[in-house]
Structures are given as structure tokens and as C-alpha cells.
Image (spheres, grey):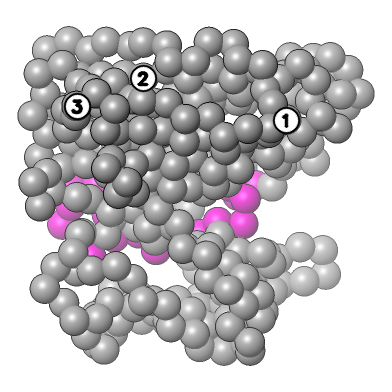
Amino acid sequence: MEFTRSSLVKGRTAATEVLSLDLPINPLSHLIISLQGLNVTDEATLDEILAFINKVTISQYGKTVMSLESEDLYGLNCYLFKNRPVLYGKIATDNQARILSLIVPFGRKLFNPAECFPATRKGEFTLSLDYTLPSASIDGGLLDIEAVELPGASPERYLKATTLTVTAPGATGDHDVDLPIGNDILAIQERMTTFPAASSLTFGINESKILVDNKETFYLGNKACSLLGDMINRIDTQHGTLAAQGSILPLNILWLDFDPAGDSNYLLKTSGKSSVKVRLNMGVDEASYLSLFELVNVGA
């Protein structure tokens, strides 16, 4: 086998726009989105750099394959690769170069011919990148996008990742969210507005429970503080202590993981079910975000 890596966008000056691109037609392993810029006075934080990207949307024939805000894409990278995306230039110096690269994956492992997006026809598989330039923290912003194709691959499945915005339910306590039915769910990523901080042990989502056809399964009301401990299976949890390096965790995120061993033995099966829900016990009456990582069988 071989792979080809091509540039779709080279050094594009960052601006407030929605950039639309046709993606390559060969089976696609992943995209690499790189953001470059120079510090304004002090070190640009991770949150400030992520503010470049409002949303990444990938679709085929108008059907969504990927729809994630930058924070959720960052979390997906952490979950899949057990590492944080590379962030260059952690120096609090004016005009120091800062570079962040995010991977947009179409399989659990990169370069996997069995798990990638299948071949398409020209113009039917597209990327829409809604982005802007956070000029208060970054000067001279540039955007680069590359694609890694796997010519000749015949994938059996691909990764789909979409985010549900859960509006403030109107009260604390239990709140049910219906999940899509049909595909195997690899993980549910919970991104909260409220997370423990100074003088507070409050989580926006206190506990999580999975119900399939109204029967509790997998997660039976597990507390956020315990899910916090599960991070040890997915990511280095002590990457630094400087404030500018950001929080220890990836942006108020926790995971309900259905592939903890990476062997597909525990995937949340939804095909043929009448109802699949996650029951959120809300610690705060506020909005939250659920990103669903699904495996789609090719031809299904």
C-alpha cells in the first residue's frame, strides 16, 4: 500500500469567513488543520488559539460526517490518540510563534485501510471551515490544511463525529437526551460549561447513565469525579503547571467510553433499538455539549 499527503490550503491569511473545499476522491485517512500566529504581548493560551475555529463540518451529499467545534475536535484528538495535539511555542514573549495542529480523523487509527472514509466522486465530499482570527491574542494568523489519502483502500467502516447542543433544561436533576439509532457508538464526549474551580467542586453534569430500550446499561449513574479518573486510560493528566498552559484536562471534557480496550468488544450497539438515551443528572441548569463518536459500516 501507499499513502499520498497533499496540501489543500497553504498559508492562507486568517480572516473571518466560512471556507468551503472539495476533499480528495481517494479513501481518506485524515486531515491536518494547522493554525499559525504570533503572540500579542504575552503567551497566547490554548483557549485563545482554539478560538480561531468556530466549527469544522464535513459532509457527503449534504449528509453530515463530521460537525465539531474546535474544543470538541481537540477532545476527540485526545481521546483517540491518547495525546494532546501539538502546541508549539509555549513562551510568554511578544511575537513568539505559536502553532497548533488538529487532526480530523476518519478512523480510530490513522493510515488504517480498513477504517477510513471510502472513495468518493469529485465534488461530493466537502469541508466547511468556519473560522476567524482572535486578533487580541494572535497576530499574522495563517491557516494550512493537508489531506492523507489511502489509494486502493477498501474500508469496512469509518468514524463519524457530531455534537449535540443540550440547552439548559430549566432545572437541575435528571435530564434525558435521545441519541441517534443505527450506528455503534464508540464514546460520548461531555463538554460542560461548569467544572470544578477555585472554592467550587461543582460539575455542570454530576452523573451520567445510559438507557437502551429503557434498561440501564454500561454506565449506571456514574459520577463526574469518577469519570475524571478514567482520564488515566486516555491521556497524560499532568502536562504542566503554568496558567498559560491551560487546565490539566482538555477543556472541561469527560468521556463515556465504550471502547476502553480499543478492541471493539464493548461498543454501544444501537441498531434495531427503539430508544437509546443518556440520562444527565445536571448539577447546574445550563447548556452542555455531547459529541458522539460513531462507527459507520460502509454501505450501511
- What kind of residue is marked 1? Leu
- What kind of residue is marked 3? Arg
Residue behind mark 1 = 133
Quadrant into which the N terminus falls: top left
How many residues crowd mark 3 within 10 Å: few (<14), some (14–19), many (20+)? few
Q: Nearer the viewer, residue 217 or 104?
A: 104
* Dominant secondary-structure state across the stretch colored magenta: loop
Locate residue 157, reporting x and y percent. Answer: 15, 42
Task: Check residue 121 in the rendering and tell me which mark sits there, or answer none.
Answer: 3
Q: Residue at x 29, y 21 (%)?
A: 24
Helix, strand or loop at disc 3? loop
How many residues crowd mark 2 within 10 Å: few (<14), some (14–19), many (20+)? many
Measure how far apart labels 2 and 1 are at the Cα level: 23 Å
Residue 269 in sight in this render: no
Q: Residue at x 69, y 26 (%)?
A: 15
Residue behind mark 2 = 147
Q: Is residue 255 magenta?
A: yes
Q: How many marks?
A: 3
Q: Which one is earlier in the sequence, the residue at label 3 or at label 2? A: 3
Locate residue 140, reporting x and y percent. Answer: 76, 16
Q: Is residue 174 left or right of residue 96?
A: left
Q: Which residues are magenta?
A: 248-268
Locate residue 69, reporting x and y percent. Answer: 54, 47
Q: Is residue 94 left or right of residue 66?
A: right
Helix, strand or loop at disc 1? loop
Q: Is residue 111 left or right of residue 50?
A: left
